[in-house]
Image (cartoon, rainbow, N blue to C red):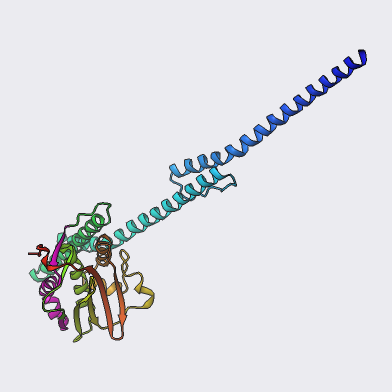
Amino acid sequence: TEPQRSELQSAKETLRIFMVVVAVLLALLSVLLTSMIMRPFAELRTALRKVSAGDLNQTVEQHSYLVTSQISEDVNTTLRKLRTLNESREEFVSNVSHELKTPIALIQGYAEGLEDGLCEEKEMREQYLGVILDEAGRMNKLVRQLLTLSQLESDKPDLNMEVFDLRESAESVLRKTKVLAEESGAKVSLEAPDTGISVRADAFRIDEVLMNYVSNAFHHVEEGGEVIVRLLPQGERVRCEVYNSGKRIPEEDLGRLFEKFYKVDKAHTRKYGGSGIGLSIVRAIMTQHNMPCGVENCPSGVLFWFELPRAAQTDGEEHK
């Protein structure tokens, strides 16, 4: 009938309008969702472009969407690490430049003095040449230490693990530093079991650790004081301690002594040719061995220590 056809036509018209409205709303919703989803990626892209241009001071806003939020968090974490690495690199370059600046200036100055004929007397020439050689040796030592530290901090350090007698190593280091002992006037003693202590480690690197600790002790021991090397078996480990009587280390400096180029007394360190690298090498060596090391103040001096795993002497790999 006519009324029914009219109602049907009206329903169709209403349905078409409804479908158009729904289509428009869906289109708007699609545009909105696309914008909301793409905006975080656009921010990421902008941030990464700035990073590639060398600007590491970027922080990506974390949105509420699970995927983009996780990506933003990962990017921010990476950027923080990159900033830290960049700051460390800049600090390292600055420290190396500072350490090399003085010897280079002295070498240049004394070399120019020689060239200008300011040293006609043999004694004066020898003095100038002595300063040049000393400063050249200081730079050579710094470069060698930096190369050693770089190798130790690499992902694949070249460690030669073997069984050796730690007492023999300590005795060897004390023999090598006998001149320092005589110059300091200190009383030197080794406290260790007579039977020796077998440990498993890189003997050459552990000698470096001992040499650093013992030479530092002689450089800082008070006049007429004492330097003691102790080897203390403690279960499956052995603790090595190097003690020197004298001035204690300020508490605020204790936690930073093993940092690269860190010096408590810069004037005194330069006087005996220190570079602030030695203890960093110690920490790197012990880190590669997965063993601890540290420093403590004592009532009348300072004590440096490290630990190594003990090894049975029956292993048949004694260090020669």
Relative to 172, is 40 above or below? above
The answer to whether residue 113 is visible is no
Residue 229 picture location, percent across and down: 19, 78
Residue 105 picture location, percent across and down: 25, 62
Viewer-closest of 159 and 179: 159
In the displayed structure image, the side of residue 234 where residue 203 appears, left or right: left
Residue range in magenta is 160-189
Which quadrant of the figure has residue 40? top right
**Which residue is depicted at the point 41% across and 55% down?**
84
Which quadrant of the figure has residue 142? bottom left
Viewer-closest of 290 and 296: 290
The answer to whether residue 79 is visible is yes
In the displayed structure image, the side of residue 62 where residue 156 appears, left or right: left
Relative to 196, is 259 above or below? above
**Which residue is depicted at the point 62% across and 39% down?**
36
Q: Magenta segment: does it hold 175?
A: yes
Relative to 5, is 253 above or below? below
**Which residue is depicted at the point 23% across and 79% down?**
243
Q: Quadrant of the N terminus?
A: top right
Give the prevailing secondary structure in the magenta stretch. Answer: helix
Q: Quadrant of the C terminus?
A: bottom left
Residue 18 picture location, percent across and down: 78, 26
